[in-house]
Amino acid sequence: MDRSILHPKEVCGLHRGNGRYGERERNRKRKIQKHKFLSSSSDSGFDVSFESPKHEIPPDTLFPPSKEVKRKKTRNTRCKSPTQVLRLKRNRRIKANDRERHRMHTLNDALERLRMALPTFPEDTKLTKIETLRFAHNYIWALSQTLGNADNGEITVNVGNVTVSITENGNMITSSTGSCAVAAQKRLGPQHTAGFPYPPQERFVAPEWQEYDCYSDQSVSPPMQYQPCYDQRMYQIHRPQHQLTPPSHHHMSHHNNMYQCL
DNA sequence: TAGGCCATCTGGTCCT
DNA sequence: AGGACCAGATGGCCTA
């Protein structure tokens, strides 16, 4: 079976078939076939049409070498038939796809663990990838700020409705809505009340409040100022500019599903 | 129906 | 030669 024309979900056994799929998929396959004919690649084993002897064009005709005309052959490679070359390319592509899929799953697993470590509102929908990363960054920043100002061995961090207290006697997470602690405990298991996987970080000066568009200007991002993510659920770290330590109680302007972080 | 989010494929680049 | 990583493209699903 030619994998190249399989839908990704089919390849992975994840395809949830429905009525609409058939027609769109047929169109997609037609597109792919067309694309294969028009494009070439160095590594893909799927550009069969272009590579057939009928269409073969000497590479130097299209892309004449700019610097080195003749390259020394450093390796004695065995001659391969076109069929063997195609098979080799296809196998490499399949392997590369598998690796990439596995890599993305690994990344997603890591992201999921991060998501679980963050305090969230149980009634909320799952944080998206970008939200998770942004929120984690803000959360870590908040922790680092708070740790720098810890008095009496007690640390309190407010993240929206959620208040996290770290004391010598243990950690506690509470919520003004009352259900968050339960949810956090469910997620993290009975031995935890809150997860703090990150070591205290070096303290740095809090930047002034500024708006940050997490999509349009990512170049501004690190070295890690807090980054409000402008989504329907918005996480903000809100503080007076002269005050570097978080206030001891919430600044709650809680409207339109917006969180204020500290 | 448009837009957001996501999984996957793909080709390029760098490294071992 | 092959693996890791990355970014762009593509198409499916879901929701407002």
Image: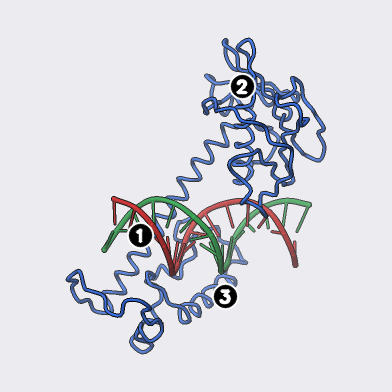
Chain colours: A blue, B red, C green
Task: Name the residue at 62% across, 32% down.
Answer: A141
Badge 3, how many Cα within 10 Å: few under 14, some, many 20+?
few
Give how far across and how far down residue A64 sits, in percent: 38, 82
Q: Position of residue A123 (x, y in %)?
A: 71, 35
Side (left or right) of A17 relative to A228: left
User: Disc 3 vs disc 1: which is toward the camera?
Assistant: 1
A212 in relation to A63, above or below: above
Element at label 1: helix
The residue pinned by badge 3 equals: A27
Which mark is nearer the camera, 3 or 2?
A: 2
**Residue A134 placement: quadrant:** top right
* Circle 1 residue: A95
Q: CA distance from mark 3 to mark 2?
A: 59 Å
Residue C1 is situated, as x and y percent measured from the top left of the image, at: 26, 63
In the foreground, A177 or A214: A214
Residue at 64%, 19% (x, y): give it: A149
Both marks 3 and 2 on one chain: yes
User: Which chain is home to disc 3?
Assistant: A
Instruction: Measure the alpha-carbon separation of dots 2 and 1.
Output: 48 Å
- What amino acid type is highlighted by mark number 1? Lys
Q: Are marks 3 and 1 in contact (CB under 8 Å)?
A: no
Q: Which residue is mark 2?
A: A148
Q: Chain of mark 1?
A: A
